[in-house]
Amino acid sequence: MEKSTERFPLTHVFGFVLSLVLTFVAAWVALEMNLSFTIVMWIIGTLAVIQAGLQLFMFMHMTEGEDGKVNIINIAFMVFCAVVIVVGSIWVLTSGHAAH
Amino acid sequence: MSANVNTSLPLEYQTEQSRMNILGFWIFLGAEIVLFATLFSVYGVLYKNYAGGPTHQDIFMMKEVMIQTVLLLTSSFTMGVAIWEMRRNNKKGLIGWFILTLLLGAGFLFMEINEFIHYIHEGATMQTSAFLSSLFVLLGTHGAHVTFGIFWATMVIIQIAKRGLTPVTARKTFIIGLYWHFLDVVWIFIFTFVYLKGMVL
């Protein structure tokens, strides 16, 4: 956490370029390459998680301040809840239980 | 509250009250993550239930989606620069980048509304299939957040213009900044797990 002293927002420009690159790589892998569905989903899923982390750390200043650790624990726990909700729901509702 | 002013910190963190407000907003964002998780899980369960209606490939327009994505990514960047200008105590720079952010957000919204109108013309409405119901609810909730953010940010801009940069207006600006970046994070996942996934099915 600092008052800005440099004359140019270098981290922001770097983060912006990186997020554009990640977006276009994901689009290229999904739309132009002939890979199997599972492989494409693993690649673009990983790219999405990297890009979300980029936003949280480079743009949202998640770790700064005396509450930085609390922020990380809070967001990590909510991401855990999100994964449980999404993966759990899809697993339970699509793994053949509906057939009974 | 005023007894606890620490002027070595950026303006938005200087009072105890502001630090508490920012922490509280992070906790709210945690709840928003879970809200969107429930909508993603509904979509993840129902995304192949076409009920004889149009499929992903029938309705998705990838060129428009790419433009929407770039608009929102750029607006997240300009929001970051606005906060950076605020920390240099540059009120004019802050307001300029802030307004640019909202224009990009409005551009995104305009394209999303056009996308919905296009879907409805194609016969893909909310009532057509479970796939489209869950799609419209997920995209619509995100779009409603962007709409709300534009109104909220407009009021914050008016307040900065009237009262200048104070610990209170700086804290409000920082918090709307967090909200705006969060909407971009949600869009990254919509782009990946709705649009790109739909196109490789």
Image: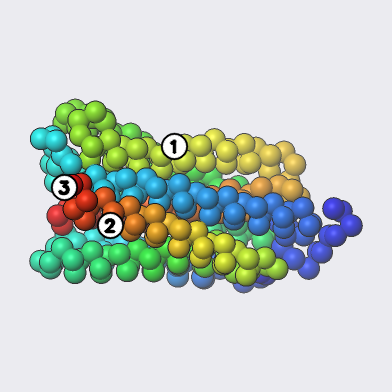
State which mark lies toward you, 3 or 1: 3
Drawn side of residue B123 relative to residue B89, left or right: left
Real-space Cα distance between discs 1 and 2? 29 Å
> Residue tagged by mark 1?
B144
State which mark lies toward you, 1 or 2: 2
Q: Position of residue B110 (x, y in %)?
A: 36, 36
Q: Position of residue B18 (x, y in %)?
A: 73, 54
Drawn side of residue A16 relative to residue B197, left or right: right
On the same chain, marks 3 and 1? The answer is: no
Residue at the spot 57% in from the left edge and 41% down from the top edge: B153
Q: Which mark is residue B161?
A: none
What residue type is disc 2 on? Trp
On the same chain, marks 3 and 2? The answer is: yes
On the same chain, marks 1 and 2? The answer is: no
Does label 3 or label 2 sit earlier along the sequence? 2
Residue at the spot 50% in from the left edge and 49% down from the top edge: B32
> Residue tagged by mark 2?
A91
Classed neighbour count for the residue bearing mark 2: other residues with Cα under 10 Å, few (<14), some (14–19), many (≥20): some
Residue at the spot 47% in from the left edge and 41% down from the top edge: B145
Q: Which mark is residue A99?
A: 3
Q: Chain of mark 3?
A: A
Real-space Cα distance between discs 3 and 1? 37 Å
Residue at the spot 46% in from the left edge and 58% down from the top edge: A81
In the depicted structure, whether residue B108 falls above or below residue A54: above
What residue type is disc 1 on? Ala
Q: Secondary structure at mark 2?
A: helix
What residue type is disc 3 on? Ala
Q: Chain of mark 2?
A: A
Residue B112 seen:
no
In the depicted structure, whether residue B44 falls above or below residue B51: below
Q: Chain of mark 1?
A: B
